[in-house]
Amino acid sequence: MSTTTSPTDGGREPATMSVRGAAVWAMAGQYLSFTIQFASSVIISRFFLSPAEVGLFSIALSAAMIASVLQDFGLSRYIAGLPTVDSAALARCSSVALLFSFVVAGLIAAAAWPMAQTYHQSALLPMMLIIAASYLFVPFAVVPLALMGRTMSFRGHFGVNVGGAMAQCTVALTLAAMGYSSFALAWATLANGIARGLIAQILRPALPWPLRVDGVKPIVHTGSRLTTLYAIGALGSRTPDMIVGKLLGLVAVGLYSRAVSLSDQFRMLISGAIGSVFYPAFARIRDRGEPLGPAYLRVVAGYTAVIWPGMTGLALCARPIVHLLYGDKWMAVAPLLSLIALTELFLVAMPLHTDLPILLGKLNRLLLFNAVDMMMSVLLLASFCRWGLEGAAASRLVYGVGWVMLYARFLHGVIGFDIRRLLTIYAKSALATLAAVAPLCMVYLFWIPPSLITLPVLIPAVGCGVALWLAMLMLARHPAFGDLTGLAGHMLAPLRRVVARG
């Protein structure tokens, strides 16, 4: 592995791990964090909080997340793009991170009273102040994580993500059991921020002190443009809970946010955190002067081969899954979850739609496309809310179709991939998806409907689907089949070494 000279690390940066090795650590951290957070959300929703209580926190968090786009201020991308990171650059980046954490916390705190008045919920005021405090600890994690990501040292990311998830879960469950209602989730958010900051500093110290603001113009220039991009994206992704809450009420937003959260969590479960590995990997390809198109098609193949069957299966299993996890009081989530899960089929068809244009210097055009994207998302949701919660969820499907139409030509012009090969990958992924869900569809059609299916029937049907999915990937010579088997072999290599020693 190559190394890079850096005074910060005694003349050398840590050796970078392989892309596959980085993916394994990123996925392991994501899976374990997911398991912790998912178990916590299930227990809290099933035993302690109602849809209205979850909805109240969702509104507060969504409002905070709009301001939170400033927390990174493009530092991760800026640090990843530096040829070397010396002590002066590290001090400047850490100082910028600290200063903008106060900006973010101040904006969230300032919005607390107007939000409480807008939604006629006085509890939003203290809840948003607690969430605002969590962002004061973000700078202690941002720069260390960026430095570790720069060398693809995702073991550190594993520790930060899992440690933060454990702290959040512990606080949330304890306070929910003690009757703190929605505030249990707010205090858990603060605990997550504190834990992430502490662990990141232990693993890769980069304290933002003493402050250094000289020479920050390049950081501010890059960060301001990226922050504009992230702000536009946040308006599109974070306002749905606020729109549904305002137009349809707290119970509705609690149900809607639970469906979105479950869909997002399941997508992350089956895809892992490998997206965080791709930016530095593509930066290497760019720096070598090689075309990005073939590598991009491999990414598309991997995403569609895995996420398409998974999300289609989730849509088909929505009713039994919701009943099993959350109980009868959350059953209205099931039809929403089916529609939102199917939306993911469109949203993963063109992955890395912001990362690669940023990497290739197409930020100005990307800003325009993101603005159209945001307006399309918000207007469709607000319009479809007239048909209630299912209308709101259905708007996501319409949005997904529009999203692909918006970005497909843009990304083709930026990356230069082979359209015919892309369509071939889509066709093979579609075949694998049909094979994966065929057993469950047969059960529904000829034996037991979704409302009556039980785990002893559901699990074998899903298991048969997985076997057929793998067989179809192999028979269709899907490009992702070799990558998936190679990744599995890499993950099993330590076990094989232990067995060999024994």
Image (spheres, rainbow, N blue to C red):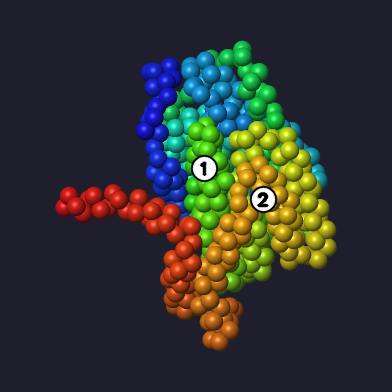
The mark that comes first in sequence, 1 or 2, is: 2
Provide the residue designation for mark 1.
278
Of badges 1 and 2, nearer the viewer stands: 1
Residue 201 rendering spot, x and y as whole percentages: 45, 29
How crowded pointer 1 is (Cα within 10 Å; few <14, some 14-19, many 20+) is rated as many
Residue 332 rendering spot, x and y as whole percentages: 66, 68
For this orientation, the residue located farthest to the top is: 214
Query: Which quadrant is the N terminus positioned in?
Result: top left
Q: How many marks?
A: 2
Residue 303 occupies quadrant: bottom right
Q: Residue at x 43, y 39 (%)?
A: 154
Residue 480 rendering spot, x and y as whole percentages: 48, 57
Kind of residue indicated by mark 2: Ser
Kind of residue indicated by mark 1: Phe
Residue 247 occupies quadrant: bottom right
Residue 457 rendering spot, x and y as whole percentages: 47, 79
Residue 46 occupies quadrant: bottom right
Q: Residue at x 39, y 57 (%)?
A: 485
Q: Residue at x 75, y 48 (%)?
A: 373
Q: What's the distance in space between the residues labelled 1 and 2, CA to CA?
A: 30 Å
**Can you see residue 88?**
yes
Q: Is residue 359 left or right of residue 285?
A: right
Q: Is residue 53 above or below residue 284?
A: below
Q: Residue at x 66, y 18 (%)?
A: 217
Dot 2 lies on which element? helix
Provide the residue designation for mark 2.
58
How crowded pointer 2 is (Cα within 10 Å; few <14, some 14-19, many 20+) is rated as many
Q: Is residue 461 left or right of residue 104?
A: left
**Can you see residue 187?**
no
For this orientation, the residue located farthest to the left is: 502
